[in-house]
Image (cartoon, rainbow, N blue to C red):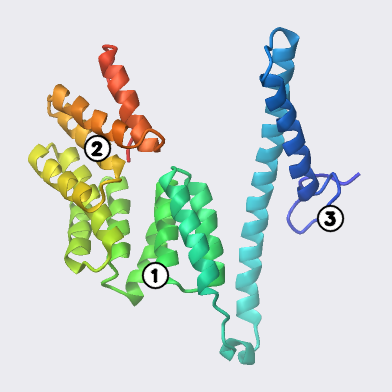
């Protein structure tokens, strides 16, 4: 009987059988569809426990496959480096096929995943984009952004260093490195990099997020006026950046302006009920109105 998931480099079933990745996905889909159908009816007693066990079983199996897939990806990357080191000289001079259209599709997909707070999903999409367009500065910077959001600050800094060595005035790379410094607690370094990104200009996304993170830097320093000015500029450039309403309310709350804080969160909640940061704003409003202290998450 074939074991799933197989180890990288080991023997495994790569066809469409019940023990392959394709077969498992089909099985999970059928099992989850059955659970969804069962939940359309009243569930109680042993039936409820059985559904719980089924959901836990599918989750464990899917988690195991995700872990194995990550190992395969790392193994492939390791072998790619060995291949590059041993490739004949003629191969080194051969043109590299670049699929810009396919890469842009994955860049958009990754950005969408980031907007939903899915850093691992974004990282995966950006790596796909770089496989189609190796050496893309945009792809490398967005990969660093996803790594930083996922907590991989060291890896993110390394990727950004490579981009800035080639393109010292790359605005988005500067803004992203400023975010990394902010996550590391280096407020002075973060402010310097973010202001450089604003000064370079030419990249709307870089300028937008540079202003937003300058607002976060100011909030952490307790400089409410500076925070308000930075968040106002960020919202002027990107009205849909609901994180700015969240952080603006947080700055006001920490400055003792509870009513103004709730007003900011109400605006953010009303602007995007299905946006993760819009929902966060709404939850803060409910907590405060219920007489509870707000619980903040870092942007």
Quarter of the figure with residue 296? top left
Residue 250 in the image: above or below residue 233: above
* Number of the front mark, 1 or 3: 3
Q: Earlier in the sequence, mark 1 or mark 3?
A: 3
Could you say which is closer to the camera, residue 210 or residue 232? 232
Which badge, 1 or 2, comes first in the chain's sequence? Answer: 1
Mark 3, residue position: 15
Residue 298 % position (x, y): 32, 37
Name the spot of residue 240 as percent of width and height, x first. Answer: 30, 45
Quarter residue 44 falls in: top right
Q: Residue furthest top?
A: 45
Extreme residue toward the left, this view? 225
> Can residue 182 be seen in the rendering of this structure?
yes
Label 3 and label 2: CA atoms lie apart by: 49 Å
Against 260, residue 74 (above or below) is: below
Left or right, residue 154 beside residue 10 = left
Q: Which mark is residue 162?
A: 1
- Cα gap from disc 1 to disc 3, whole angstroms: 39 Å
Quarter of the picture holding the N terminus? top right
Question: In front here: 294 or 75?
Answer: 294
The residue tagged 2 is 245
Secondary structure beneath dot 3 equals loop
Tell me: residue 282, above or below residue 287.
Answer: below
| Cα distance in 3D space between marks 1 and 2 | 33 Å
At horizontal 73% and vertical 55% (from top left) the residue drawn is: 8
């Amino acid at each position: 009987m074939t074991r799933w998931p197989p180890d990288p480099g080991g023997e495994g079933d790569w066809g469409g059988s019940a023990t392959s990745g394709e077969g498992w996905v089909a099985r999970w889909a059928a099992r989850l569809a059955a659970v969804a159908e069962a939940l359309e009816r009243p569930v109680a007693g042993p039936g409820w426990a059985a559904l719980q066990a089924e959901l836990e079983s599918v989750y464990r199996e899917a988690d195991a496959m995700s872990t194995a897939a990550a190992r395969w990806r790392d193994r492939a990357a390791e072998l790619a480096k060995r291949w590059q080191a041993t490739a004949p000289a003629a191969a080194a001079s051969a043109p590299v096929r670049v699929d810009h259209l396919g890469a842009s599709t994955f860049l958009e997909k990754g950005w969408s995943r980031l907007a939903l707070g899915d850093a691992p999903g974004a990282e995966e999409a950006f790596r796909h984009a770089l496989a189609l367009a190796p050496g893309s500065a945009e792809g490398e910077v967005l990969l660093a952004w996803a790594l930083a959001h996922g907590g991989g600050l060291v890896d993110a800094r390394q990727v950004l260093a490579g981009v800035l060595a080639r393109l010292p005035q790359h605005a988005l790379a500067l803004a992203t490195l400023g975010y990394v410094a902010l996550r590391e607690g280096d407020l002075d370094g973060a402010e310097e990099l973010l202001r450089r990104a604003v000064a370079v200009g030419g990249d709307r996304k870089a300028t937008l997020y540079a202003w937003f993170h300058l607002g976060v830097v100011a909030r952490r320093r307790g400089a409410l006026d500076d925070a308000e000015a930075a968040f106002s500029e960020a919202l002027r450039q990107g009205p849909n950046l609901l994180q700015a309403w969240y952080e603006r309310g947080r700055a006001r709350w920490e400055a003792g302006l509870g009513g103004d804080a709730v007003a900011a969160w109400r605006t953010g909640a009303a602007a995007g009920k299905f946006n993760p940061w819009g929902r966060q704003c709404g939850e803060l409003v409910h907590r405060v109105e219920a007489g509870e202290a707000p619980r903040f998450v870092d942007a």
